[in-house]
Image (spheres, rainbow, N blue to C red):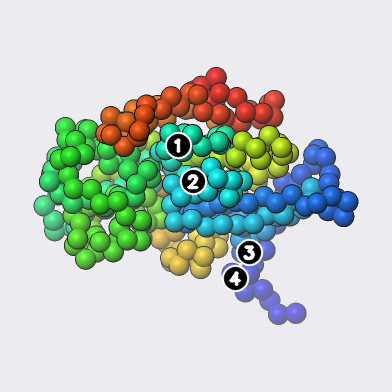
Amino acid sequence: MALLTRRAFIRVALASSLSTLAPRGYPQTSATNAEPTALRIGYQKSSTLTTLLKASGSLDKALAPLGVRVSWNEFSSGLPLTEALNVEAVDFSADVADTVPIFAQAAHARFVYVAQEAPSPGAQAGIVKQDGALHTLADLKGKRIAVTKAAGSHYLLLAALIKAGLAPADVRISYLTPADGRAAFERGSVDAWVTWDPYVASVDRDADVRILADGKGLASYQRYYLASNRFAAAHPEVIQIVFDQLTQAGVWLRAHPQQAAQTLAPIWGLDAATIERANARRSYLVRPVVAQNFGEQQKIADTFFQAGLLPAKVETAQAQRWDFAVKRAEPAGA
């Protein structure tokens, strides 16, 4: 038998490592005597751990004994993903930036916070031209800036403006997807591009590019995993398995950064070195959402409201979070 290629070997090793979390202790549902449950997962390019689970097939394998069939749906950014969650076009949202659930809450979306990644402030940044005139945050006044609306980088921009004593009206903001933001930046249609990894890592080594500021001291950048209220209440055992698999994927990535990057490279269309650099700036530490780690959400909500970007004040403590001890949704601030 021919030897496995290096890529195939990595894929097999990843699947083997992540499949250690079998669904022991959960009620078994045979697909032969019950209709399979569909788990529709929405994710985006920066949903690293979810992409690894999809590539390895480990989540599908862990859920199969329960008769759960997984479908995967990719979105361009977090806002359309949570809109799909709100209309129940998907059941589970892979990690979105901390800003995104606030916009969903403002739209009265029915969702529950399931998990949170520990802060990764260095995983988003404002990018400028190396030979440009922008050297401090105050230099942003009057300049053209590309950012994705409601993304974590949008809050980073607002926080940076506040630190510089500027208001959103003092700059010219273009709301663009990451791909369009990069194109606008490269052709000189904007003076700065505020985005997140792996998009930052895709350009930060270019000789004509430099980082004006990242999130350190401005925005902690905690990413959240969400589920529809209806699905979580009906399938707590599925929520537990998904959480366990995400946690294990984070452990595996931190222990095998090169293998993870090589697995993601053909999926993301980036070289492995770029991906490894981007991943090094993310914590990938998946944990339950608890009140003491939730405080920045209100600050983010207040900042967007004061900037006139939310229709009404949002009380983030009134959102729902999943309590794994009692297997039900509880107020986020409790």
Disc 3 target residue: 11
Going from N to C along the chain, the mark reached first, 2 or 1, is: 2
Residue at 18% x, 39% y is 169
Q: Is residue 322 left or right of residue 167?
A: right
**Contact (Cβ within 8 Å) of mark 1 with mark 3:** no
Residue at 30% x, 58% y is 181
Tell me if I can see residue 253 in this picture.
no
Going from N to C along the chain, the mark reached first, 4 or 2, is: 4
**Contact (Cβ within 8 Å) of mark 2 with mark 1:** yes
Residue 301 at what x, y percent from top left? 37, 30
Residue at 82% x, 40% y is 27
Q: Residue furthest bottom?
A: 2
Give the residue type that dot 1 points to: Ala
Residue 186 at what x, y percent from top left? 24, 64
Name the element at disc 1: loop
Q: CA distance from mark 2 to mark 1?
A: 9 Å
Name the element at disc 4: helix
Give the residue type that dot 4 points to: Arg
Frontmost of labels 4 and 1 is: 1
Q: CA distance from mark 1 to mark 3?
A: 40 Å
Disc 4 target residue: 6
Is the residue marked by circle 2 packed among few (<14), some (14-19), or many (20+) residues within 10 Å? some
Quadrant holding the C terminus: top right
Disc 1 target residue: 107
Q: CA distance from mark 4 to mark 2?
A: 39 Å
Residue at 31% x, 40% y is 156
